[in-house]
């Protein structure tokens, strides 16, 4: 069904595009929040992402990759904001997310907050947003085997922490 919406959006169907954004806004918000922490920056990144996606949706070659594609756009906008604000780390903000997360998600955010920085975003995308390792590799622009090894090592670190 999403692929049909994407194809309609690529044909300038505004309702289809709005529906796609509505379906994905919570997931995009969580990713932006874990990168930026600050609500104003999150809102800016989300707004820039929606505008970029709308302007470039015709360039998306495979409609089934919409979620991966828009998440990658969002992460790029988050990184741009961090560079503009001259902040050095992105993933430390995930710890601030714990306090504002819904009750059900707090334990998850607390756990991944204990992981090394390189692992946090991978865990958020894999377990929190249910992306596949190949999609995470695309989004973060790293090798898929790196994603898999960080997942494995992260699980080992969490196992040690929890027991």
Image (cartoon, rainbow, N blue to C red):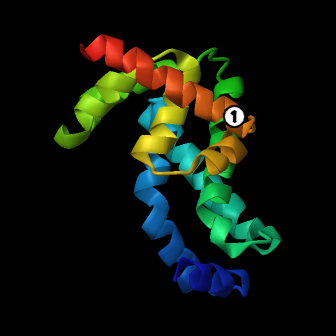
Q: Position of residue 58 (x, y in %)?
A: 79, 75
User: Is 92 left, or right, of 113 in this rendering?
Assistant: right
Residue in front for this viewpoint, 56 or 131 = 131
Q: Going 56% across and 51% down the picture, which residue do you hit? A: 132
Q: Quadrant of residue 100?
A: top left
For the point 46% across and 51% down, the residue is 130
Location of residue 104 (image quadrant):
top left
Front-lying residue, 157 or 80: 157
One can see residue 65 in this view? yes
Q: Image quadrant for the C terminus? A: top left
In the image, residue 95 above or below residue 28: above
Q: Looking at the picture, how far across and down is residue 135, in whole percent?
A: 64, 51
Residue 1 lies, with reference to residue 106, above or below; the image says below
Question: What residue is disc 1 on?
Answer: 145
**Secondary structure at numbered mark 1:** helix
Who's the residue at 82% across and 69% down the image? 59
Instruction: Describe residue 30's horizontal placement relative to residue 83 as left or right.
Output: left
Q: Residues within 10 Å of mark 1 (few under 14, many from 20)?
A: few
């Amino acid at each position: 069904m999403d692929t049909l919406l994407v194809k309609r959006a690529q044909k300038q169907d505004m309702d289809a595009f709005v529906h796609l954004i509505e379906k994905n806004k919570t997931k995009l918000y969580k990713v932006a929040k874990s990168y930026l922490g600050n609500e104003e920056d999150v809102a800016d990144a989300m707004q820039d992402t929606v505008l970029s996606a709308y302007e470039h949706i015709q360039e998306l070659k495979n409609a089934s990759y919409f979620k991966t594609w828009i998440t990658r756009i969002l992460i790029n906008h988050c990184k741009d904001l961090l560079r503009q604000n001259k902040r050095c780390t992105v993933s430390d903000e995930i710890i601030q997310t714990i306090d504002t997360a819904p009750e059900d998600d707090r334990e998850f955010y607390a756990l991944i907050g204990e992981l090394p920085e390189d692992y946090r975003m991978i865990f958020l995308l894999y377990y929190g947003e249910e992306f596949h390792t190949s999609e995470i590799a695309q989004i973060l622009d790293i090798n898929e085997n790196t994603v898999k090894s960080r997942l494995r090592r992260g699980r080992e670190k969490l196992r040690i922490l929890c027991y």
